[in-house]
Amino acid sequence: MPTIKLTLEYEGTHYAGWQRQPNQPTIQEAVETAIKDVTQQTISVVAAGRTDAGVHALGQVVSFRIDRDMTAYDWTMALNAHLPPDISVHAVDFPPPEFHARYKAKGKLYQYRILNRSPRPALDRQLLWHVYKPLDDAAMNHAALHLIGSHDFSSFETQPTENEDPVCHLQRLVVIREGHELRIEAYADRFLKQMVRSLVGTLVDVGQGKRAPESFAAILAARDRRAAGKTAPPQGLCLLRVDY
């Protein structure tokens, strides 16, 4: 039975996250419903990452197996005809049968957008976090350096969670300023529950002078979520890419 790999983009504003939930709209439900509409078969799909409510994706990867003879073009056109306008399939591939969107992933790139100015935004307000107080991006980048490498990131993991392994290899964490906008990019082999949003919230504390950049070593060592800053709101976060 062939394996299908979809690359999706979506705006998560009106969804309760990726994972199917009773009585709430989710990305997974919308995708599975579209597949059923196209094939008249009930299929369960697997995603590379279970994005939270309000979180977006530009390169979410989904896989499933189905006995259906369709070209990549046919899959793309058919699914997009049945998906809501805030979810789109922009690539379809036919990987080896053993491919699994979640377990075969080797790295993920997330981006978090912050608008750092006094006036509130009118455009893109559902795609970024408005922080009106000035942020010191140089101090934020200094703090980020303390997190690069393989560490126990329990201090940045929201509870409750079923995860039993808190060690991640964070290869990139950088703050890029372009005018009034800050983009925080994080790349790792894996991420814990709400880890990127917790990192961002703590980096913002540094940017506002509430924490010293050097404090991040102690936050890691604490292995306690209470040692870090608040969890940044979901709308600024986007899953850009999944590597295999």
Image (cartoon, rainbow, N blue to C red):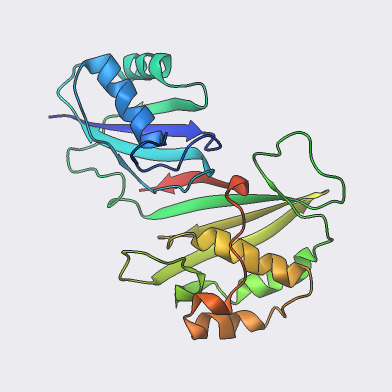
Q: Residue furthest front?
A: 23
Name the image quarter holding the N terminus: top left
Q: Residue at x 31, y 49 (%)?
A: 102
Q: Is residue 69 left or right of residue 146?
A: left
**Residue 170, x across and y down, in percent:** 49, 66
Q: Is residue 231 left or right of residue 31?
A: right
User: Residue 14 or 6: which is nearer the viewer?
Assistant: 14
Picture quarter containing residue 175?
Answer: bottom right
Q: Which of the two residues, 29 or 177, is positioned nearer the viewer here?
A: 29
Query: Left or right: 218 with respect to 72?
Result: right
Q: Does the rendering let one see residue 111?
A: yes
Q: How many marks?
A: 0
Please say if 82 is above or below 125: above
Please tell me which residue is depicted at 49% across the width and 45% down the height of the picture.
53
Q: Residue at x 67, y 74 (%)?
A: 143
Q: Can you say whether 53 is above or below 132 in the image?
A: above
* Location of residue 132 with respect to 38 vertically, above or below: below
The answer to whether residue 70 is visible is no
Choose top left, top right, bottom left or bottom right for residue 91. Answer: top left
Q: Position of residue 237 (x, y in %)?
A: 58, 48
Q: Position of residue 205 (x, y in %)?
A: 71, 70
Q: Residue at x 82, y 49 (%)?
A: 180
Position in image of residue 150 (x %, y %): 44, 74
**Image-based side of 177 in relation to 61, left or right:** right
